Structure formats: structure tokens, C-alpha cells
């Protein structure tokens, strides 16, 4: 029978490996929850039709004053044919926790395509400078919508994060979530 007393194996305990296992499990849980939440955000708006909707993505998570932004837009009319104006509306700076961030008057309305026809699925791309959109440092809700006769047929909202001028570029994404008290 081996002698475990002098082998150093008796120092193994859950107290030594426990915090790292808990951190690893917590990180895995955060990644799973985040991926589920992100997947639910992209097709936020639904029109009449089984799979109709809009997805809007930007080419970066963070911009600085004077930068250029590209909006990548995917539209799906489902089984319907739709036509109207494809618009981009920038709303005043707000917190993502604020309710109804797109209910007031927009700061800027930009027509992406005046006579847009959609039958099925299509993609569009729109590039603009932040100066043209009228934004400074802050978080701005941006709504892309297909409208006809003043009625929104399809639409989705994304956020435009603008850092103060002269700042350095931080990480693209940082998640901080306190699951419990620090280990004692």
C-alpha cells in the first residue's frame, strides 16, 4: 500500500481547488446565459408573417467622435412582399435600462433607401460618420425601420456607444456579474 502521508497528496482539498472550479463554472454559466440573451436580441421586432423581422449589427462595439460606423442590416418579410422607405433613426442618449427609448422624437432621421422593395430575405449596409448622425459621447438607441405611409412595417433597435474624444480603446466587451459573495 502506498504511503500517502509523505507524498504531498494529503494537501489536496476542495478549499484549494474549489474557488477555481467555482469561477470556471460561473464563467461557463455567464457565457451560456449571455449567448442566449444575445440570440434573443437580434430578431427583436416581428411583423405579420411567420419569420418576418429585422436584425441590425454595427461593425464595432465602441466608437470615438469623428469615427465612421457601418450598419449591417438583414431584413426578412416572411411570406409577404413589402415596400417603403428604409430609415435609420438616432434617438437621444439614454440608458439601456430606460423604458421606451425610441418613443420620443429622434435626433436624426436618415433615409437609407427611399423606394425599398422586399420580398423574402435581403441584406443592406449603410455607412455614415458619427458627425453626420449628430452624436457625441454617450449611448444612443438607433432604430432601423421599413416604413410605408407613416406606418412601421419592420424595425429593430441597436445601440451606438460613443466614447469621449481622446480616450483609449477599451476591451470590446466586458461582462461583470456578481454571483455570490467573495470566497471567505
Image (tube, rainbow, N blue to C red):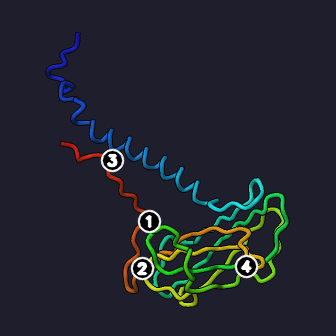
Estimate the x, y position of residue 17 in percent, counting from the top left.
27, 36
Categorize mark 1 by other alpha carbons within 10 Å: few (<14), some (14-19), many (20+). Answer: few
Of the pair 136 and 63, the residue shown nearer to us: 136
Q: Could you tell which of marks 2 and 1 lies nearer the N-terminus?
A: 1
Mark 4 or 2 closer to N-term?
Answer: 4
Q: CA distance from mark 2 to mark 1?
A: 19 Å
Rendered view: 11 above or below 135: above
Circle 2 sits in a helix, a strand or a loop, which is it? strand
Callout 1 secondary element: loop
Q: In this rendering, is residue 32 above or below 58?
A: above
Of badges 4 and 3, the one in the foreground is 4
Q: Earlier in the sequence, mark 4 or mark 3?
A: 4
* Residue 82 horizontal side relative to residue 25, left or right: right
Disc 4 versus disc 2: nearer the observer: 4
Residue 6 locus on image (x, y percent): 14, 22
Contact between marks 1 and 4 (CB within 8 A): the answer is no
Residue 146 or 127: which is nearer the viewer?
146
State which quadrant residue 108 falls in: bottom right
Label 2 or label 1, whichever lies nearer to me, is 1
Find the distance from the CA under tag 4 to the CA under tag 2. Answer: 33 Å
Q: Which mark is residue 120?
A: none
Eye-nearest disc, 3 or 1: 1
Residue receiving disc 1: 97
The residue singled out by tag 2 in the image is: 163
Viewed as shown, does residue 96 lie left or right of 108? left
Whether label 4 touches label 3, CB < 8 Å: no
Label for residue 150?
4
Amino acid at each position: 500500500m502506498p504511503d500517502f502521508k509523505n507524498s504531498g497528496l494529503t494537501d489536496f482539498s476542495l478549499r484549494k481547488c474549489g474557488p477555481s472550479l467555482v469561477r470556471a463554472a460561473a464563467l461557463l454559466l455567464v457565457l451560456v446565459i449571455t449567448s442566449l440573451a444575445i440570440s434573443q436580441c437580434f430578431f427583436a421586432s416581428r411583423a405579420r408573417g411567420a419569420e418576418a423581422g429585422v436584425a441590425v449589427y454595427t461593425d464595432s462595439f465602441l466608437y470615438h467622435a469623428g469615427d465612421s460606423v457601418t450598419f449591417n442590416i438583414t431584413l426578412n418579410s416572411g411570406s409577404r412582399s413589402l415596400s417603403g422607405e428604409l430609415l435609420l433613426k438616432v434617438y437621444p442618449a439614454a440608458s439601456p435600462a430606460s423604458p421606451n427609448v425610441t418613443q420620443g422624437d429622434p435626433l436624426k432621421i436618415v433615409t437609407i433607401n427611399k423606394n425599398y422593395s422586399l420580398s423574402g430575405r435581403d441584406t443592406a449596409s449603410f455607412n455614415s460618420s458619427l458627425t453626420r448622425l449628430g452624436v457625441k459621447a454617450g449611448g444612443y438607441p438607433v432604430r432601423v425601420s421599413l416604413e410605408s405611409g407613416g406606418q412601421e412595417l419592420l424595425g429593430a433597435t441597436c445601440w451606438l456607444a460613443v466614447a469621449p474624444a481622446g480616450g483609449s480603446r477599451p476591451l470590446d466587451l466586458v461582462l461583470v456579474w456578481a454571483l455570490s459573495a467573495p470566497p471567505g
